[in-house]
Amino acid sequence: MVSAQVSAPPSTDVVLRATGITKRYGGVEALKGVDFEIRSGRVTTLFGENGAGKSTLMKIVSGVERPTSGALELDGEPIRFASSDDALDHGIAIIHQELNLAPNLSVRDNIFLGRELLTPFGSVDFAAEDKVVRELMERLEEDLDPAVKVADLRLGQQQIVEIAGALAADARVLIMDEPTSALSANEVEVLFKVIEDLKSEGVAIVYISHHLEEALHVTDRAVVFRDGELVAEAEAADIDLGWVVEKMVGAADEEVFADLAPNPGEAVLEVEGLVVADPQAPERNVVDHVSLRVRAGEVVCLYGLMGAGRTELMEAVAGRMPVVSGKVSLEGEDIGRLNVRDRIDRGLGLVPEDRQRDGLVPQLSVGRNISLASIGDFMRGIFLSGRIEDRRIDEGLAKTRVKTSSPKAPIGSLSGGNQQKAVISKMLLTEPTVLLLDEPTRGIDVGARAEIYSLLAQQAQQGLGVLYVTSEIGEAINGSNRLIVMHKGRLVAEFDPREVDRHTVMAASGENADLADESAQNQMGASQ
């Protein structure tokens, strides 16, 4: 768990000030006259739903975009950044919400891309870069070889590389947009230690996170955005989680979860004795003789820490990873020999953990991303019926409440939450019997999270079987009919979410090692 900290005393040293910032995209006003300050040695946390204007303001502050109107001051002097490189030259660095890495390059080359260290002869000083990378990785407590390709790293390690790149810039102002969305609990702890070190060095930090409780642990001052406006701000000592949620959406945190129907039907997905080998070390099993079932109309949560084998289990069930042994059945039919496409056609869909890499095609529009998995349904002979496709796309957008100016808009124009809803819409358009979702709310605000869980509850009421993975304890307890805990490749406990507390679930997952074995022994026997 993240450790609480004592907030730093208020600083009067304003490093950067934004005054009257507006930003328009066509007829849409993303920012409406925002006044904002960043102070040295303090963490200012921005809260707000997707589309509230947080990331837009930070893109302006970091030189990625220019404001429609308004002004920026750096150290009390007016300034206009020509580009993100210009802002970086002035000491302002940003860790973007969506990873901004070149997967075909090494860790070292990603960290120093565009700002390479040179020898006196003008060539790249790889030895010096390697030394810096190793020092950064030691600071972040991550054992990564500077020469390894980013494409070969898991998502959490890629996030570490993104963070290391920002640290290497030695910035005065460091903007962290969802820096922990793919990190394990231990990696979050390390990052927070680094943040404390940076604060002591006078670095001003802007922190954006949809992990509300986590963000409250690290912040010194909270700022809430809604509909492009700064609507509330307060010192961390004067607020709590309820204050943040209420200012964001006008509801208590527990109210974001819909009621779930208590009467599931027959088993639609059955997994028996599934074994999956670690691709990097085939002698080790990342999924170790796992058996579970999901019934029609039931929402089942698979909770566990990063590295527990959750993603590998989901991808093996979906046909994306090879299976050593075991059986996967859908409505009584063994689908072990079917590929991913055939499993989708049979009624099994997966919403993957990494929407950018595995869920979306960035070159396509919102509509085409949504219709992609169902394209065969729109064919009439050898021709694609655009009329039918457009109608189904509109139905999908309405069902998942994707906020977009048009189905023809680029998928990259959507906020992270709306991109995630587009991926879910794509899979629902295939009319699945069972829907698998791997961390469905990663990088998503409380409002979008409410919409996603409400949608899953509605679909379950219509007979859909749902199995989702999360590392968010609140989502595990409040969003499911049944809660299964996974630890080191095995299912170790099963709970009725209405009758269990957070401490017990977290103990079973291994977050409290002293209690994990006892919890597993007490709980798993009755669940099989």
Image (spheres, rainbow, N blue to C red):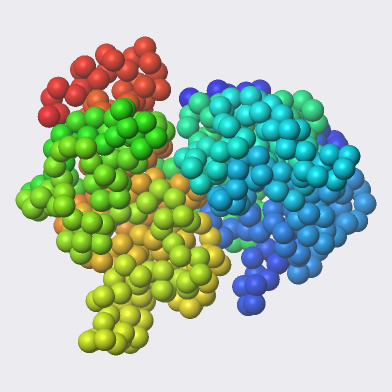
Q: Nearer the viewer, residue 322 or 467?
A: 322
In the image, residue 440 above or below residue 147 = below
Q: Which x, y percent locates residue 112?
A: 71, 44
Number of numbered discs present? 0
Any part of residue 287 in sight: yes
263 to 458, vertically: above or below: above
Drawn side of residue 48 relative to residue 81, left or right = left
Q: Quadrant of residue 22?
A: bottom right
Q: Quadrant of the C terminus?
A: top left
Q: Is residue 451 above or below residue 200?
A: below
Question: Could you tell me which residue is drawn at 26 percent across and 82 percent down?
Answer: 379
Residue 485 image position (x, y, % from top left): 28, 31
Q: Residue at the right extreme? A: 77
**Left-right relation of 350 to 188:** left
Relative to the observer, which residue lies in front, 291 or 205?
A: 291
- Residue 64, picture quadrant: bottom right
- Hey, which quadrant is residue 223 in on the image? top right
Residue 57 in percent (x, y) is at: 69, 56
Instruction: Report x, y in % for residue 190.
Output: 59, 26
Is 344 on the left or on the right of 217, as rendered?
left
Please tell me which residue is depicted at 22% across the width and 34% down the height of the picture: 275
Camera-nearest residue between 504 and 176: 176
Residue 262 appearing in the image = no
Q: Is residue 338 above or below residue 37?
A: below
Residue under the point 70% across and 48% down: 113
- Residue depicted at 27% across the width and 80% down the height: 378
